[in-house]
Each structure stands twice: as structure tokens, then as C-alpha cells.
Amino acid sequence: MKKFYLLLAICLMSVVAIQGQKDLKAEKELSKMRSSIQAEKNSERQLSSSINFFHRRRGTTTRDLIEIARLMPNDRSKFKLSARVYPNIVDKQNFFNVFNIFERFSFAIKLYHETIAKERVIIVDEEVDPHSHIDFPDARRYRGRNGINCRRPMSDRNFDSYITNLRLPYDEKERLRFIKQEVLRTCFSTAQVMKLGLELDLERDKLSFLKFASNRVYDLGHFDAAAQILNHSYYKEELLRFINRDVDQIEEIEIIEEVCVVDADEFRFVQQSLDAEPFRDNKRKLAQKLISKHCFDMPQLRIIFNKFNFEDDRLKLMIFAYDYAPEPRKMYQFRNLLKFRSNQQKYDRFLIDKQ
């Protein structure tokens, strides 16, 4: 019997050793591929060699894909690689982590449709206009004060064609810089500037853009309506303070970027307030109020969501928090807080509708 257990132990040790050698070999291959991609300057060859690498590779994990996909030069290449590799992924339950590598949320949604959605039955509601709550001012009969070098705005018909064909950079910072340049070279109405601002993901970037455009639109008298595209009261109030300043003597001013953060001491108080509330409904309403009034970062939001033991409450709060999140396109990272498939599907549907 002792010989049997000794032989079994030797076999198990051999299996572990062989697996360790395989893992080491796979890691070396991945490292070599990373170096090869970084040395290659041609984007098409980067993509082609990456696809071929994963085609030959067995047991590809989500982590492996992310490591290589991050090296791709743009979102389009990341999307093509991820979509091609998806069938070979062994841990598809972790595939949602891939969505975080994209600069533009639209590519994450597109990848979702091409991969996970094809393996699931998800009923998507009829398309809803996510901006139906916004009242865009009509500049056609405006007779008030005009902005700098803006005496005749682009017609709404031409603007619809313009924004449909507008090629925006994938990177948020570049996108902000691009639309600021568009405001400098074209006369837009307030409504048109608002629609351009909605192309930005982050609240602070929307505020920066609106400040920049505040004295350049055709219908200056309507510009306070632009606060509607901001969700946080902090940013709304900052914009209204900015546009109500005395601009009669100042045409070109330095725009100071405002940063809205919740420091450690304040967040500790927030957690204590939530922990002290014994009733589910009251606790969720309190959390919603706090989220709407404070600029929580993504890790802080995760901590708040985890304060709720009932998954239905957590889902409702995650959906509510979308409009107040600092990085809405990364809200997929909270999907792993939901364990029930029905709730995961509801969250998937919500994120698709928001796009």
C-alpha cells in the first residue's frame, strides 16, 4: 500500500512538473509575441501576426488576449483581433474584461454583439433615444447676442449630415481637442454644440468643452440650456457659474479645468452613512442621492455597490449610477458583481440601450 501511495505521489508530481513546463513555455511564447508586435511598425502586419499567433495557440485565456490586444494601435484593430480570437478563448466567463481595453464604448458594444450576444438569447427592447429628456433650444428665431465670429449658424439640416459623417478620434483627449477646433472654425448653435458635447464620455471633458464654446455659439442667450448634457450637479453648477460671469470685458479667457473628487475622509463618512441605514429601500435611495451629488471614482462606486447584499438592489443602483459614472464606457467592469444570469442579461440590455 505504501508503494502504491508513493507511486501515486510521484505521478502527481510529474503531472505538476509537466504542466509547469507547459505554462512556462506558453508564457515565453506570449512574451516573444509582445516583443515582436512592439518592434513591428506596420499596423496591418501587427494585426495579422497576432491573429496567426492565437490561431496556432491552444488554451488561450482572456488575459492572454488582453495583453496582446492592448498593443494594437487603435480600437478597430483591437476589435478585429478580439472578435477573431473569441472562439478559442477557454475562460469565456471572463471575456467582459476585454471591453475595458477600448477607448470608444461603441467598439465594446460592437464586440459584445459579435461574440457573447451570439451565444445568448437576449431580448432587446425597441430602440430608445437616450437623449429624449434633453430640450435642445431652437435658434431659428433667435434675435439676441451672438458669440465671437458667429453671425450665422450651420443649418440643422446641414448639421445632421455633418455630425453623421464626422470622423472623431477614438481617444477621448484627442476627441475633445478635435471638437474644440471645430467650434473655432464653424459657427454652431447652442443645440449643435450640445450634440457635439454628447460625443464625449467624461463629465469633466464635457464641462471643458462647454466652457470653451460658451462665448462662441450663435445664440448666447440660450447657452444655459447646455447644462442639460451634464449629469452631476457639481458640473452643472460650475458651468452655470462660468457662463454667468461678466464677459462684456473679456472675450478670450483662460479656462481652468475643474476637478471633482471625493477624498478618503468624505468617502469614509459616505460608507458609514450607508452602513447605518437598516432598511433596504431607504439605503438604496440614500445611495442614489449620494451618487447624484458626489463625483465618485470607479473603485468607490464598486465599494458602494458591494454594500448591497440583495442583487436586485445592486442591479438597480448600477443602472442608476450609469449617468453619474466618471467613465460610463467602463461600466461593464461591474458586471461581475451580478451572479444571477437573469440580472446579467438585464444589465446587458441596459448597457446596449444606453449606447
Image (cartoon, grey):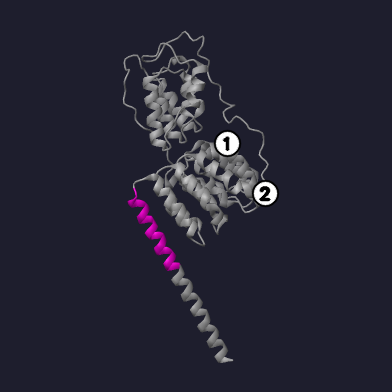
Stretch in magenta:
23-40
Does label 2 or label 1 sit earlier along the sequence? 2
Front-most of residues 287 and 121 = 121
Q: Is mark 1 on a helix, strand or loop?
A: helix
Q: Distance between the residues labelled 2 and 1?
A: 19 Å
Q: Where is residue 51 in the image (x, y as percent from the top left)?
A: 46, 52
Residue type at mark 2?
A: Ser
- The residue under label 2 is 342
Front-most of residues 167 and 194 = 167
Most prominent secondary structure in the magenta stretch? helix
Residue 152 in view (yes/no): yes
Q: Position of residue 325 (x, y in %)?
A: 50, 40
The circle drawn on residue 354 is 1
Residue shown at 59%/39% (left/top)? 352
Task: Left or right? Give the position of 88 relative to 211.
Answer: right
Residue 269 in view (yes/no): no
Q: Where is residue 26 in the image (x, y as percent from the top left)?
A: 44, 64
Q: What element carries label 2?
A: helix
Name the image quarter holding the N terminus: bottom right
Residue type at mark 1?
A: Lys
